[in-house]
Image (cartoon, grey):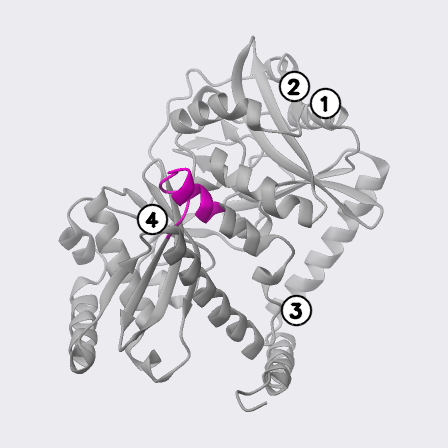
Amino acid sequence: MARSEAPAVADFSRAPAAADRFDRLDIAVHADIAALETEWRRLAEAEGVSVYQSFDWIAAWLEAAAPAQAIRPAIVTLYDDGRLVMIWPLGIERIGPFRIARPLGGEHANIRMPIVAADWRCEADDAAVDRLLRRIAGTIRGVDLFDFDALPLDQDGAPLFLARHSAALPARCNVGTIRLSGDFAAVLAAHRGAKKTKKHRWQKNALAPVGGYQLRRAASRAEADAMLDAFLAEKAAWFRRNGLDDSFAAPGVVPFFRALIARRWDDGREGVIEIDAIEFAGGIHAILGSGTANGRQSGYFLAITDDEWRRISPGELLIHEVIEAACARGITLFDLGRGDERYKASWLDRTETHVRLIRPVTLMGHTAALAIALRDRAEKRIRDDERLWSLVGRFRKRRGEARSAEQPTAED
């Protein structure tokens, strides 16, 4: 990311200071979140969480993906003298003999955190946090280890105690963001505006002979489903070309996005998913899926067509237009998910730091934690070794070529 801006100084005068307040929390665990809807929506709105913690996003994941992936729901609610102060949307996954509690959403949730009331965002002693985790594990029953990944260090400048545990390690990826205002010209000027304006003008001129372009936002369930189909086809081809496994092909993932679309258009839950596309020359050439909550728009997925029009960078054109439209709608914070790809870094100038916290609560959990640590260490060594990472790249390229060759042609 180009630069990071320090968060505003928070007022911690109401923050819980010691272990005894954690020990007094009342814990409940729910497999069905329907009864929690009213309280959930109220707390999520009051605490300004991202779309990934919204009731509709989690409900859609539980409806479509969790059963397909054999994930046991364990929605944890924590009360302070009868007042709901936290919601932890967790699921229990079996990996071999191990039972691992993780935030719901997997790799498709770019921000994985509990909903925490403002006066409970705090620093806390490791021992107090570990006791709380053991109490939660005892209430859930059947948990060996907690694995909190993609966990932000802070929310609105206040620390999140899980992320501040001394055992927390840097996550593989952070999330880049950009602050927006209603004045897109000012936002553009602050982000290499002259260069972006020149590129945007060139793109308009390049597309003028084919009638120009338009930013198109899905206006119905049928249109959104069609755009999702186009995205899935293009992304599957991209994964195949690059020799990578298709994360959207995992059980329940496509039905999950269909469930979001249904909630958006059948139930009127605006913001849970929107799909934008750049259209020109008779077709769609870039697609962005995103969700919005509490003034923050978060990118779910992005794909561009692999054809002769790549030369005009339709993905960059789409992001430019989407950010301008977001400014007009009053969005104040925008992100494109995890990762530091070039097309993200050219706009996103703040870094939302994420960590991963792994805490075992049983003997089996300690074994699982060791296995995860060894795997992560080996992966990091490969990524940090230029020669080894180059070998991985060549292997993926060859696998991608082989997969592409296996695809049937129109004549087959």
Residue at the farthest top position? 81
Q: Secondary structure at mark 2?
A: strand
Q: Quadrant of residue 145?
A: top right
Q: Which residues are magenta?
A: 260-274
Answer above or below: position of 254 versus 233.
Answer: above
Q: Horizontal placement of 268 versus 354: left or right? A: left
Say whether marks 3 and 2 touch (CB < 8 Å): no
Position in image of residue 125 (x %, y %):
62, 25
Q: What's the amino acid at mark 2?
A: Ile
Q: Is residue 353 visible?
A: no
Position in image of residue 270 (x %, y %):
35, 40
Q: What's the amino acid at mark 4?
A: Phe
Q: CA distance from mark 3 to mark 2?
A: 41 Å
Q: Secondary structure at mark 4?
A: strand
Name the residue carrying label 3.
382
Earlier along the polypeptide chain: callout 4 or callout 2? 2
Q: Answer whether residue 261 is magenta in the image.
A: yes
Q: CA distance from mark 3 to mark 4?
A: 32 Å
Q: Horizontal placement of 140 versus 192: left or right? A: right
Q: CA distance from mark 1 to mark 4?
A: 36 Å
Q: Nearer the viewer, mark 2 or mark 1?
A: 2
Answer above or below: position of 364 versus 389.
Answer: above
Is 222 in front, or is 192?
222
Name the residue carrying label 1.
135
Earlier along the polypeptide chain: callout 1 or callout 3? 1
Image quarter where the N terminus lies is bottom left
Residue 334 is labelled as 4
Is 259 in front, or is 20?
259
Q: What's the amino acid at mark 3?
A: Ile
Q: CA distance from mark 4 to mark 2?
A: 34 Å
Residue 27 is labelled as 2
